Amino acid sequence: MNKVELCLNLVSALDWIDGVVIGVDNLQQLNENIRIMSEKNTIDLDNIFKSRPIVSEKSLNPANWEH
């Protein structure tokens, strides 16, 4: 699974997300995104959330970044 597939499968597996808005650069990318979203891939959400890095709010909030 590549990064795009991981991201699209992750958001489509979350039951509290009703829709996804994504941009595309060309027709090929649009068709690939449609293919990915049309396939029903199973994704191990528990494993993803357990293994993700813990990042501080200072790192996540651009207002806290030094210029």
Image: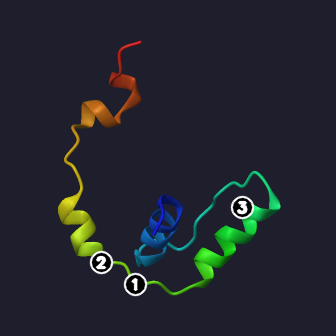
**Residue 41: horizontal and vertical position, in percent?**
46, 84
Looking at marks 3 and 2 on the same chain, the residue that comes earlier in the sequence is marked by 3
Describe residue 37's horizontal placement relative to residue 54 as left or right: right
- Residue at left offset 59%, top offset 75%: 36
Left or right: 2 with respect to 37? left
Answer with mark 3 or mark 1, whichever residue precedes in sequence: 3
User: Residue under circle 2?
Assistant: 44
- Residue holding disc 1: 42
Query: What separation in Å lies between label 3 and label 1 (alpha carbons)?
Result: 22 Å
Residue most toward the top? 67
Quarter occupied by the N terminus: bottom left
Q: Quadrant of residue 29?
A: bottom right
Name the quarter where the C terminus is drawn.
top left
Distance from Cα at disc 2 to Cα at disc 1: 7 Å
Residue 60 drawn at (x, y percent):
33, 37
Q: SS for tag 1?
A: loop
Hey, what amino acid is under mark 2?
Asp
Q: Which residue is mark 3?
A: 29
Q: Residues within 10 Å of mark 2 (few under 14, many from 20)?
A: few
Q: Is residue 18 above or below residue 56?
A: below
Q: Amino acid type of disc 1?
A: Thr
Q: Residues within 10 Å of mark 1 (few under 14, many from 20)?
A: few
The image's mark for residue 50 is none
| Residue 53 % position (x, y) | 22, 49
Relative to residue 59, is residue 24 depicted above or below? below
Mark 3 touches mark 1? (CB < 8 Å):
no
| Vertical order, 40 against 52 (above or below) | below
